[in-house]
Image: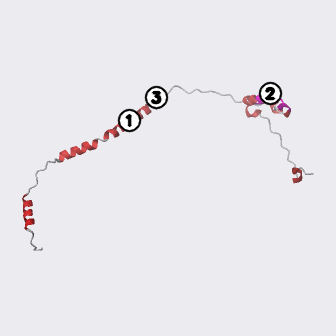
């Protein structure tokens, strides 16, 4: 250790500090813990209110779903008969719309409505069978362009 002399003022100040004793504390550990708990509980009212509101909404939703799905009786069964077979007359002579029928819009509309009614009663079997397509003729470029 160094043996340097201290200032007299510092030695005197040190002696005064040694004579001082710590004062009895006014802070109680229990009081500090109690105040900390009370301060932390102030923000809980918002969270507890939100939790209570969501709980109430959940109970209301569950009750409405339960009441809405209560048993009301057996389901109604509807029997549908099989569609009738296509008439042989329709199969042999299907209704056709010709260009002459298109001259009168009423006649064309009536044929269309008859065909629609036959479809409703007899199903897809009422549709006329498509005619066999002829093989297309091969034309040259000159014929297509109209050159002789």
Q: Earlier in the sequence, mark 1 or mark 2?
A: 1
Dot 3: what SS?
A: helix
Residue designated by label 2: 106
Residue designated by label 1: 53
Q: Residue at x 36, y 36 (%)?
A: 52
Residue designated by label 3: 67
Q: Is residue 103 left or right of residue 40?
A: right
Q: Main secondary structure of the magenta part?
A: helix
Name the front one of labels 1 and 3.
Answer: 1
Q: Is residue 64 above or below residue 137?
A: above
Q: Is residue 26 above or below residue 19?
A: above
Task: Please report contact status of discs 2 and 3: CB closer than 8 Å, yes or no.
Answer: no
Place of residue 75 in the rendered image (x, y in percent of width and height, measured from the top left): 56, 27
Specify whether residue 105 is painted magenta.
yes
Q: Residue at x 77, y 32 (%)?
A: 126
Q: Is residue 8 left or right of residue 67?
A: left
Place of residue 39 in the rendered image (x, y in percent of width and height, measured from the top left): 26, 43
* Residues drawn in magenta: 100-115
User: Which quarter of the image is occupied by the N terminus?
Assistant: bottom left
Q: Distance from label 1 to label 2 (Cα)?
A: 67 Å
Place of residue 124 in the rendered image (x, y in percent of width and height, measured from the top left): 74, 34
């Amino acid at each position: 250790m160094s043996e340097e002399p201290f200032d007299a003022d510092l030695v005197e100040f040190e002696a005064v500090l040694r004579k001082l004793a710590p004062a009895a504390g006014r802070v109680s550990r229990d009081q500090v813990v109690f105040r900390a708990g009370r301060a932390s509980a102030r923000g809980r009212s918002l969270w507890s209110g939100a939790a209570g509101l969501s709980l109430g909404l959940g109970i209301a939703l569950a009750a409405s779903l339960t009441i809405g799905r209560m048993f009301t009786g057996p389901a109604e069964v509807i029997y549908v008969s099989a569609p009738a077979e296509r008439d042989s007359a329709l199969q042999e002579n299907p209704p056709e719309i010709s260009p002459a029928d298109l001259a009168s819009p009423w006649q064309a509309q009536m044929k269309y409505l008859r065909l629609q009614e036959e479809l409703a009663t007899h199903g897809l079997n009422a549709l006329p069978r498509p005619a066999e397509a002829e093989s297309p003729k091969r034309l040259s470029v000159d014929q297509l362009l109209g050159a002789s």
